[in-house]
Image (cartoon, rainbow, N blue to C red):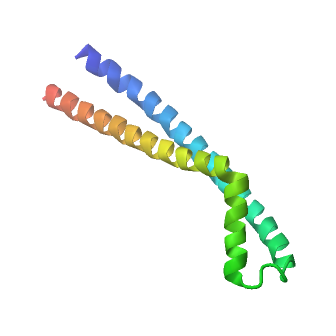
Amino acid sequence: MKDMKKQLQELPVEIKTLQLKIFHMQKTLEDTERTIKEWETKEMEDICEQKDVFTNADKRKAELERRKKETLSDVIEDVKKLKNDIEMQKIELAFLMATQSNLRAIARLGDT
């Protein structure tokens, strides 16, 4: 029973810590995605200025994708990894919250 009481006291701190970690990871993801969008906008402006080379929207889009792969491939991989890490942390958070709920239910049963 003491072990369960200790867990019930520690779980809120663990949950809060994990929630803050997820928040900061999401903020980093948003900032990185915003930076990518800003880069894409600048590159598209440059591509659009070269109308004689990139004569239609499909060619311009293809050129943007080519430049993106060439320049931002590491950043794009980091974004994918960060998204996966966030999902894994959310799974861990759900587990901690379920554990807390189960321990509370067990404690209530023990009180009756």
Place residue 23 in its image quadrant: top right
Residue located at (79% from left, 66% from top): 43
Q: Quadrant of the N terminus?
A: top left
Establish if 91 lies above or below 73: above
On-image quarter of the C terminus: top left
| Percent x, y of residue 71 | 73, 53
Spot occupied by residue 38 in the image (x, y as percentages of width and height)? 76, 62
Nearer to me, 30 or 23? 30
Q: In this view, does 75 lie above or below 99?
A: below
Q: Nearer the viewer, residue 31 or 67?
A: 67
In this view of the protein, can residue 91 be seen by the observer?
yes
From this viewpoint, which residue is outermost toward the top? 2
Q: In which quarter of the image is residue 67?
A: bottom right
Q: Position of residue 86 (x, y in %)?
A: 50, 44
Q: Is residue 27 visible to the viewer in this orientation of the structure?
A: no
Report whether 29 appears left or right of 105: right
> Which residue appears at 70% of the width and 60% of the height?
68
For this view, does 35 lie left or right of residue 7?
right
Q: Is residue 67 left or right of residue 13?
A: right
Q: Which residue lies furthest to the front in this view?
A: 53
Judging depth in this view, the residue of 39 and 29 nearest the camera is 39
Q: Residue at x 70, y 58 (%)?
A: 36
- Residue at 50%, 40% (x, y): give it: 19
Residue 80: x percent and y percent?
Answer: 54, 50
